[in-house]
Image (tube, rainbow, N blue to C red):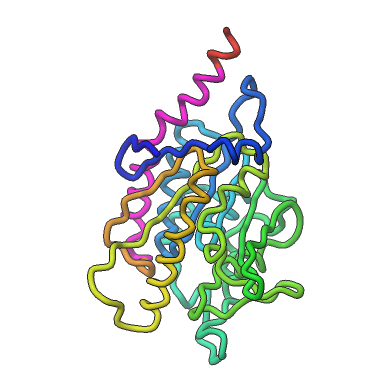
Amino acid sequence: MASIDAGVRIAVIPLHLQKRISKPNHMARPQIGLALGGGFARGIAHAGVLRVFERSGISLHCITGVSAGSIVAAAYASGVSPDEIARAGSAVRFRDVARWSLCRTGFMATERMARFLRHLLKTHRFEEMRIPLGVVATDLCTGEAVSFRDVGDVFVPIRGSCAYPGLFQPVRSGDRLLVDGAMSMEIPAMQARELGATHVISVALPAPKIRRPPSDVFQVIRRCFQIMQGRSERGWREVSDLVIAPDLGTIEWDSFESGPDMVKAGEAAALAALPVIESWFLEESSELTA
């Protein structure tokens, strides 16, 4: 995998995956799919990436997300602007999306998140989104990734995708118990491909490097999560054509007050990636005139 700038990496789809994924006609205009990873408050950086794309006239064919990325993806797909997403993300606090609740399966319930989403999103159903939306959660019992798309209400899928194990209680959807989508699929690049994207851009929000041993149960769980995701990272990278990783430095997972800095980091990473994205359209133009 080559690196073109700090925080921006390129991945080439290997031959064995090319056989499995339907490949478009090279003469067709690139259909860009954006896959957003999680990171709780750090997900605000996604707004910076979207802001640069809009300013540069880069339209998306579809957008997918897990955990915090699912909230940003749903907001943007529903018609909320990147600036509005940035403002809402910077202003949100724990009490807006969850409440303390004594339960054996988690310390916090997320019913309040539905209220937050109802105010943020311009539409609340997959089939009403202005561009195709995908959300991935994890089935707690089977460990399988559960893909939500096309039709239905978005509230339960997003709440499930954001249900960080140990902190938030699992969310029931039919006969499934859902937890954080990043448990089974750190970044939903494959889902973007399944929604018809010819070129998939994944946005990863790596956690700060560990400088001292975890000091409480939540830090232990978070560190275990990071180790697990590192083991599965190769899969989503192989399905991505481009990976953008904003440099968020030491900003922690719950630092909502650092929203403006995270947006700037997302913008910087997206600007560095623009030459690669623009080259896809130049290739299309050259093929059409050949």
Q: Is residue 74 left or right of residue 233?
A: right
Q: Quadrant of the C terminus?
A: top right
Please name the predominant secondary structure of the magenta segment in the image: helix
Which of the 4 quarters of the picture holds residue 199? top right
Q: Quadrant of residue 249?
A: bottom left
Rendered residue at 53%/37% (across/down): 13
Residue 198, position as x, y percentages in the image? 61, 34
The residue most toward the left is: 211
Residue drawn 51% across and 73% down? 164
Residue appearing at x 49%, y 53% in the figure: 84
Q: Is residue 260 above or below residue 116?
A: above
Residue 60 in view in this figure: no
Magenta residue check for 280: yes
Q: Nearer the viewer, residue 258 or 68?
A: 68
Residue 143: percent from left, percent from top: 62, 69
The residue sitting at the top extreme is 290
